[in-house]
Amino acid sequence: MLKNHIKIAFRSLAKRKAFALINIVGLSLGLWCTLLIALWISDELDKDAFHIKGNQISQVMTNVGSDDGSISTWDGTGYPVAETLMDQLPEIETAVRRTGPRGGLLKIGEKSIEAQLIGTDIGFFELFSFPLKEGEPKTCLKDLKSIVLSEEMVTMYFPDGEAMGKTVDLMLSEISEPYLVTGIFKKIPRQSTLKFDAVVPVDNFLPMNNKSWGNTWVKTYVLHGEGADLDLLGKKLQHLPEEMGDDKWRTLSLQPLNDRYLYSKFENGQPIGGPIDDIILFAIIAIFTLLIACFNFINLTTALAVKRSKEVGVKKVLGAGRGSLLVQFFTESAVQVGISVVFAVLLAAVSMPMFNAITEKELIIDFSDGQIYGILVLISLATILFSGLYPAFSLSSVNGINALNEKLKGNKGENFLRKGLVVFQFFLCMLMITGTMVIYLQLQYIKNRNLGLDKENIVYMPMNHETYLKSKTFKAELANFSGIKELSSASSNFIDSWGTTSDPVWEAQSPDDGQQWFTILTTDFGLMEMLNIPIKEGRSFSPEYATDTLNYLVNEEAVKAMGMKDAIGKSLSFWGDEGGKIVGVVKNFHFTSLHNPIQPMIIRCRPAEPDLVYIKTMPGRTKEAIAHMEKVHAQFSSLPFAYHFLDETIGNGYKQEQKTQQLVGAFTALAIFISCIGLFGLVAFMANQRVKEIAVRKVLGASVFGLFNLLSKDFLKLVGIALLIAVPVAWYYMNEWIQGFAYHMAINWWLFALGGIMLLGVALITVSYETIRAVRTDPAKSLRTE
Amino acid sequence: MLLKLNNIFKWVNSGGQRVFLLKDINLSVEEGEFISVMGPSGSGKSTLLNVIGMLDNFDEGEYSFLDEPVHTLKEKHRANLYKQYIGFVFQSYHLLDDLTVQENLEMPLLYKKVGSSERKSLVADTLDRFNIVGKKDLFPAQLSGGQQQLVGIARALISSPKLILADEPTGNLNSKQGEEIMELFKQLNSEGVTIIQVTHSEKNATYGSRIINLLDGRKI
């Protein structure tokens, strides 16, 4: 029987090639994009999911309250948190600290390697599923000067593969010390968000930090029993810092490890989103696109039902039950979906490199992995069910004898459904098209916004351990080239958000002033001048004043935050510095991405502590300047040379949005295309149904334009209704999205008008092709068959 | 007694008025009869045939088929009844265009859930009996009208029904083809199959053993 159904399905497809083609093209495209998104989502959900104890691990987060009632959440905690938690809370079986990964200079034999290191506690390899190839998880980090290396490091730098028990030299800050290799860990899974080359006990990082509660330089993970009441546990540890003598502004909370990646954004101490937002967005887009394709299928299949009712009638008379007819029509849907799935997989395989390039993933379609089958079966079944359900029930419900007598003319309910589905398709298209435009325009807005600093012709390079030690001569050598106009340094790259501190105390600070948070920028002389950041009051740092290495510049926001009338000459100190005077106020400039408003900032001048060397090149001589930098770098360091352009870095700060824009744009184009071929199919069918009517009207003297109007009006009306419904919905959601930027453009009415005109235009072209063909047919031809 | 209709009424409501399609029909049919139903267009011939074939419902009256009261049976039960005992032949053949001759013949057997090997032998027998073995892989569109109707009759007979209902079986055929089909019916009847045919043609009606005349839904 099934064989028979499949046979009929293929024959009926072959007979109605155009409709089959539209169905299959639409479904293939819809399934293609669903498949890509499903793979992407499953990869995102797999992040860090490989830890066997994952559902028993939480990370301790630090919440810092501010004067205005807002709470910032950091993933770092103070050094003592781990021990205190283990002492005070019996529910917590173990707590492990981790710092890094950060760069360290590793010397193995004669080779120097810049390796990514993490510092952690003894329990690390037992808590997390990073299995050891050699060594004991319990003891490998027991001795302070022990090191566990990655499998890859060992194969690369120990020619005989024997590393255990050997000594390597590691320089974490100023001096190089010997460490004993006590373990080798296996390759880190691709799904891990934490990547590192080597592990040492966390206390090796202590000299650069301290054991205070306020210095939140370690991440703290706790192991609690499975099914532990995290709310209760969270309440218990919330005020621990204060109870242990820390200030009351700092509280603790827990976030389950399994949520850590997906919900990385916090607001007022609560996780509000993160990568999960994109997952939801793209899941919705995938569903939209697939729905649109399914609607095509439903529309065309039910439209064709009029022609197939005879078949149903005959079968009923021959004794076919409803059940067997349902099976038959589902088989037909399944055959078309099956063919489409094959095309979708092919398309996905071909487009995967491009998709990976946009999403920065390494997805593959791996048929040896069960997962792909799971995904395919799931989306195929959903598609078959969704697209096949209505047509199957509608077709099989035809009354046998009526069908044979050709009394069947398609019913009103069905026409309404068909119109509804077309409206819904174009509604979704309109949402997507306006979404794409808003994202695009907002990105343009960001690119063109005046940041308050001049980012042209600025190259910066990170310092390493070797260049840092000789930074003075290094900088002097760098500057000694005509292609380099100015040189300075800074502790940041002007896009990443940096840590803030509430440590500063200033002259005439009122005791009522609560917590105020400042960003600290450490520079060399000349950075403000290089970046053309205007000084509003006072003066900039200058080597002419010997004490300027103790003095400060502040931005306008900082003046506001400190509540000063006249900031110049006021004293200020923090982080145990000697303290100095404010010598100038700089105009506000953007030093993080435009997602965030400009924060109070204190700028200090420390020429001896360069993190990033900033260089302004002579216009047109950038290449030479970089060649010079590389040459100088090679004289000072054996480590690889790296450099970045400031404007590119700033642009990269919106990579996430750019990625979203590209993908949403592509999927929108796809969705519109699928909707249009569906519309095309419907119009073709209707025109075909009305061939005689058109011929008669033509004979009676109807004009081509009048006929065109008659045929296309109904469809364009549907598209118009869809647009009208979509506008308020799109407006609402786009406003929501745009609020995520502290600085954003206004959403204008013309945006919707433009989107609507574009969509209507595409629909008009689609409808025209078939109607014009129908209208221009010689009436004699179509009447002859009468 | 094969079937018996008692006081059958069928009507539709049109513009507030009740229009009778069948009005007080009484009919009993014995096994082995060959009945011709005659009457002008719209007299209710096809409706009567459909009611007998259980393809259509009626509004009042009683209908028993092989002593089963059809009017009280559930849809499914009724379907089983006609699947087993009744075969249909149509004026416009109603073969399935997407299926070959052989597959068309197989169709009713599939719905009766006849096993594969039995199906094959039944189809082979039927092709043989109707002398259409050479056409078994052709599609309906590749056959002449007479040939198509031959396949239609073969399909109706394949599950050995007790009753054949034929709605103007020769209506779309030329006279020579029509004659052949009527001869076939006569032969089948002589082999014991009960036949009820609707026809316009006096000549065709004479093949039957009894003639029923209808006018405006009434037997006259």
Image (tube, coloured by chain):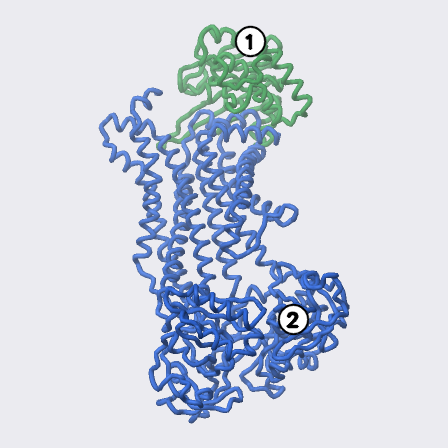
Crowd class of label 1 (few under 14; some 14 to 19; many from 20; radius 10 Å) = some
Q: Quadrant of residue A80?
A: bottom right
Nearer the camera: disc 2 or disc 1: 2
Compared across the picture, whether A593 is left or right of A161 comes to: left
Q: Quadrant of residue B79?
A: top right
- Residue assigned mark 1: B184
Of the chain colours in the picture, the one used for chain A is blue
Locate the C terminus of chain B by quadrant.
Answer: top left
The answer for which chain carries disc 2 is A
Relative image position of residue B24 (x, y in whole percent):
47, 22
- In the image, residue A126 sits, relative to residue A580, either above or below, namely above
- Residue assigned mark 2: A106
Compared across the picture, whether B130 is left or right of A20 comes to: right
Compared across the picture, whether A2 is left or right of A90 comes to: left
Relative image position of residue A396 (x, y in whole percent):
52, 34
Q: Nearer the viewer, residue B72 or A121?
A: A121
Compared across the picture, whether A302 is left or right of A3 comes to: left
Q: Amino acid at mark 1?
A: Leu
Same chain check for tags 2 and 1: no
Relative image position of residue A106 (x, y in whole percent):
65, 71
- In the image, residue A176 sits, relative to residue A549, either above or below, namely above
Relative image position of residue A753 (x, y in whole percent):
30, 54
